[in-house]
Image (cartoon, rainbow, N blue to C red):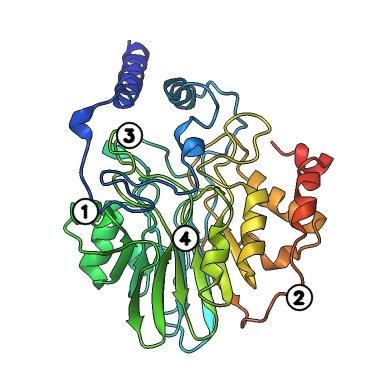
Amino acid sequence: MLKAAGTGLLFLVIGGLLAITIVPRFLDRIYYEGPAGDHFNGARFFNPDGDADTVRPPTGGSRGGFFWRYLTGGDGRPEWPAAVPVTQTRPLPQVEGERMRATWIGHASVLVQTQGLNILTDPIWSNRAGPFGFGPGRVTAPGVRLEDLPRIDLVLVSHNHYDHLDKATLKRLWERDRPLIVTSLGNDSVIGQAGVPSTALDWGQSVTVKPGVAVAVSRNHHWGSRWFSDRNRALWSAFTVTLPGGNLFFAGDTGMGDGNWPREAAAHGPVRLALIPVGAFRFVPGQMGTGSHIGPADAVRVFNRLGAAHAIPIHWGTFRLSYEGRETPVRMLEAILRQTGGDPARFAAVTVGAPVEVPAYTPPARQPDEALIDAALRSPEVMALP
């Protein structure tokens, strides 16, 4: 009887989530109002390089069918562990001058310490990424307990998806530290629902953090929604933190699009450290990227076009959002870099919670050969990865 009740509840939840995808106008929200422009039509934002690849389901079938298979586990995906061992650490209170230290918290959350500032990207400490306690659960615990974080000075929030904009975490950080929270247009309305103020900027705008340090908001290729029907009411973005010792670039959550946006970010100056997503790229066997998420191959292209000295792969192994095996993104990344003549050590996976010292900026001696990427994807080593 309990089993039947549990099955009934599961189907009720699934039915409710599927219903959300069928035009529930009462869930629509107006997050931003302003003049139309080259990426805002007066009501919704759009990718100026085209939206077709972010609108269609990543499997090519119906969106309802995609969610049904995902929620019921009926897509034949490789097994993930139920949990991954994590040794949580306590970061230094502060890192002064041009020294830079980075700690991957998990998913797209990274603590970067430099110039006496503690910078946090897309912070999420919640156990689930979704509304009302539903959504993918954490496989990997945060590498640092929230209460063990040093005082946070700057928070970057890339867009309003639940695995990137976690209102509960932002509220705790605001109540504790009163950081400057920088996001893109419309997301300040979502964050404000938690009683938390933020600074919302358009692509091409910037805000000064302190003398010599600023945050520039720039284009990437994605979409935004909290309820499906409020799609693209708020903007998505990447960020460059300009720093005396070389810049920090945070790609946010992104597909490849026209592939020009990394070069636009590089125009702000040399990139010392880039935080680039590599996971949630496969929704059917053999898929290597989607319109909304770059996989390892496109991550190498982004790294190359940024001209970054070093990078950390993010957006993998924390929440199960897609089809590929948990370790597949970073194993594929290493193989592609090696096979294209890049230096895998400059764009290497880091351990959750383990701080890494970022070397002083020096121009990269060589870049991966993008012409060899497609051949690397066809190699037996890469093709064998689940």
Among numbered discs 1 and 3, the one appearing first in the sequence? 1
Residue at image location 76% in from the left, 75% down from the top:
365
* Cβ atoms under marks 2 and 1 closer than 8 Å: no
Q: Nearer the viewer, residue 15 or 138?
A: 15
Q: Which callout, 4 or 2, points to the residue nearer the camera?
A: 2
Q: Are marks 2 and 3 in contact (CB under 8 Å)?
A: no
Quarter of the image where one finds residue 170: bottom left
Amino acid at dot 3: Phe
Q: Which mark is residue 365?
A: 2
Return the residue at label 4. Answer: 105
Please report whichever mark, 2 or 3, sits nearer to the chain's N-terminal start.
3
Q: Is residue 176 above or below residue 58?
A: below
Q: Which residue is mark 3?
A: 228
- Which badge, 4 or 1, is on the more N-terminal residue? 4
Dot 2 amino acid type: Ala
| SS assignment at label 4 | strand
Q: Which residue is painted at 26% across and 47% down in the image? A: 42
| Distance between mark 1 and mark 3 Cα atoms | 17 Å
